[in-house]
Amino acid sequence: MKSKTGVLLINLGTPDSPAVGDVRSYLSQFLNDPRVIDLPWLSRKLLVNFLIVPFRAPKSAKIYQKLWTANGSPLLYYSEKAKDLLQASLGSDYEVHLAMRYKNPSIPDVLEAMRKLNYEKIVVLPMFPQYASASTGSALDEVMRVMRTWWVVPEVKFISQYYDHPKFIEAFVARGRQYNLADYDHILFSYHGLPERQVDKVHNDGRCANHNCEQEITEENKYCYKATCYGTTRLLVEKLNIPEGKYTVCFQSRLDKKWLMPFSDKVVEECARKGMKKILVFSPAFTADCLETIIEIGDEYQEIFKEHGGEKVQLVESLNDHPTWIDCLKDLVIT
């Protein structure tokens, strides 16, 4: 009998519902992760549990209520669709599972089910194209924590990043070609932000600024989140024939001033102040539409743009269930 290979897709996570209690539980688990808020234990606990979560949960719950659809959380819905499509593409020699780093389905629960199936090999594939300790690093760390308790550990393949995979790029290019780029005054490539200190930690000398990360990928900076975001952008710009000066790389969802710059909301405001009327926004750090794309870009940035004289912020749909994205996942699993 031929042994099957287990595949574990991992996305970030979502509250179980938009109710305040479920949002509070999600935020608490997420923000207490030492790879997300990399402060000393006591400082992190006090900050998260007594300052951030109590005040943020009710506000975030209202946002999640806007985000929720008849299918529930878009991130979970599209992640499950990708899982099912990948299963159909891979065939019966593989069994594809989905877990969320935070909340449900949880990594420990899904891995326990996979352990009982006695796979010869497990492929662990976080759905984050650019490596960051707070996303991919945290997901892989949790998988290793769980697997350390296993008596039998099969062959395990970890996939850390694929920011430049040809089919990942091709899928976002296909999304972009649904629009006439000439109709837009400017194009933004908006990535999730990170604290500068977390980006600096990737580098041997502790300084991202010393490594030309906006211009090139080298052996030294190949796991630098900032470098790979710019790397993804260069490939997309080349394929879409976007001229220099018509696009900006920016970073969203910041929590304080010492995060990667320029900030997406400020770039949106600046575009409007310059008299631009229509801008197009790609979000290539997200492979499934979620709060950060649908609400933050689609609603909040639209409001900022109009307040300062602009007319339309057009969000480019994420990869979701695009067939070329599924082909990319398949390639990553089998090669």
Image: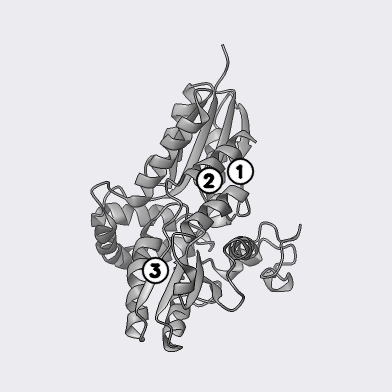
Circle 3: element type: strand
Q: CA distance from mark 1 to mark 3?
A: 32 Å
Residue 92, image x, y percentages: 49, 23
Residue 184, image x, y percentages: 45, 74
Tell whether label 3 touches label 1 (CB within 8 Å).
no
Sequence-first tag of 1 and 3? 1
Q: Residue at x 54, y 31 (%)?
A: 149
Q: Which corner quadrant of the image does residue 232 belong to?
A: bottom right
Q: Nearer the viewer, residue 68 or 39?
A: 68
Q: Nearer the viewer, residue 280 or 298?
A: 280
Q: Could you tell me the amino acid type at mark 1?
A: Ile
Tell whether label 1 touches label 2 (CB within 8 Å).
yes
Residue 271, image x, y percentages: 46, 82
Residue 195, image x, y percentages: 54, 68
Q: Residue at x 32, y 76 (%)?
A: 303
Q: Which corner quadrant of the image does residue 217 belong to?
A: bottom right
Q: Which residue is mark 3?
A: 314
Number of the front mark, 2 or 3: 3
Circle 2: element type: strand
Residue 159, labelled with which disc? Answer: 1
In this picture, residue 327 sits left or right of residue 65:
right
Q: Which residue is mark 2?
A: 126
Q: Residue furthest top?
A: 1
